Amino acid sequence: MLQILCLALCSLLTCTRADPGALLRLGMDIMNREVQSAMDESHILEKMAAEAGKKQPGMKPIKGITNLKVKDVQLPIITLNCVPGVGIFQCVSTGMTITGKSFMGGNMEITVALNITATNQLLRDEETGLPVFKSEGCEVILVNVKTNLPSNMLPEVVNKFLDSTLHKVLPGLMCPAIDAVLVYVNKKWTNLSDPMPVGQMGTIKYVLTSTPATTASYIQLDFSPVVQQQKGKTIKLADAREALVFPKGHAEGSSQLLLPDALLSAELALLQKSFHVNVQDTMIGELPPQTTETLAGFIPEVSVAYPKSKPLTTQIKIKKPPKVTMETGKSLLHFHGTLEMFAGLAEGQGSNVPLSPRSGSFTVNLVITRRKLTGFITDYLEEAYIPVVNDVLQVGLPLPDFLAMNYNLAELDVVEDYPASCLLTANRLHPMEEPP
């Protein structure tokens, strides 16, 4: 089943909020899939059926039936519905055959179709800070019963026997399955608040700030992202003025992840030093040789300082955290920094140049050949620096590790109509599976 995830990034320049964080809204499509997956992975109904015939400590024998066994357990069909302010109402539809020796002395077979219902409270574990489901009010509802007992001979006795037997057997057999499945579901978010690496520069972790909220159509979790440098220093997210609010108009049952601009800015600040480069290559792509002779074609004074051609070493340093703006079909990454060229292999190895107060370097502030020089620098950045930037950005922005969600299959579109924000919509998302 295709799922829908919407990633909304608040405007990277203007949108702000009082408490920078991240909001995750889960529709029932994803939760239903995860519970079904947990039921399948655990094989819990089959395990419960296998245990049914074993004598359990403290368990009294059922009057009128011996050698009790359960077989032919049907694949469960799970339906979930939100219970506002509580959690999820769960219904598991399945069927099975109960066999044994009846009070009449013959072999007994009872084939039943049933529903197991329970309310799964969604809480926040005070010790771990993680969300956790806890079931309550489990009931077993019989939908259909068929038996090989001769009910036409003793209908009242047989019906009373069946009613008594099934109501004794089924709750103890089936209700533990609900708890066991929730154990599997709860395990899937045990890594939710673990620090996730951002390259070699630091980590991001998503800390749940409050008990998850449940409405009539979704579950919402509020996170406080923590961005830390490798040595443990936390990068403070920028203060904000407005609360983070989900845009409207999403498909029923879809899920959304809303990230503030402050989080992306903090991550870029974390990567800032990774954008510093020191390029010593003389030949770069289709560019002319990176030498003082080439540079003299734009700044004649260079030839006076360096009559003999020397290779150039280029250093680029980013002075402020980069910023991003996004529009339909494109995104822009804005850098504020310096580009310096040195005659020689490294800073300090060049000769004194009268064009700059620094030894072995020069600052371009000439007007004579400014237009040509701008073109030269632009070409240089495209050939030598943009590949470095793209490589740094490959680390990506780690997203909440929630229910082993596979974000790699998302198809993203930028929507500009929502006020003061950029909305990225992922039309394809398969949690827990790879594309066919």
Image (cartoon, grey):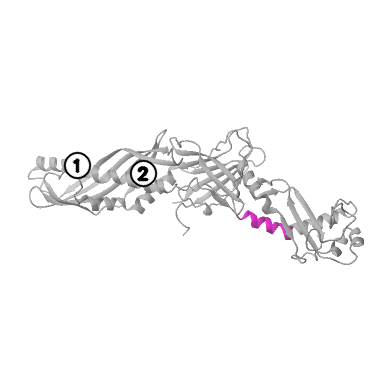
Could you tell whether 224 is left or right of 322 in the image? Answer: left
Query: Quick one: SS at disc 2?
Result: strand
88 vs 38: above or below: above
Sequence order check: which comes first, mark 1 or mark 2?
Answer: 2
Give percent across and percent down for residue 300. 91, 59
17 magenta-colored: no
391 magenta-colored: yes
Q: Which mark is residue 195?
A: none
Give percent across and percent down for residue 156. 10, 40
Give percent across and percent down for residue 98. 19, 50
User: In front of the other: label 1 or label 2?
Assistant: 1
Q: Residues within 10 Å of mark 2 (few under 14, many from 20)?
A: some
Q: Where are the magenta residues, as a range?
A: 382-394
224 vs 34: above or below: above
Could you tell whether 288 is left or right of 224 in the image? Answer: right
Q: Which mark is residue 168?
A: 1
Q: Amino acid at mark 1?
A: Lys
Front residue of 214 and 321:
321
Q: Is residue 327 visible?
A: no
Residue under numbered circle 2: 79
Question: In the image, what residue occupies the spot 55% across and 45% down?
Answer: 7
Query: Quick one: SS at disc 1?
Result: helix
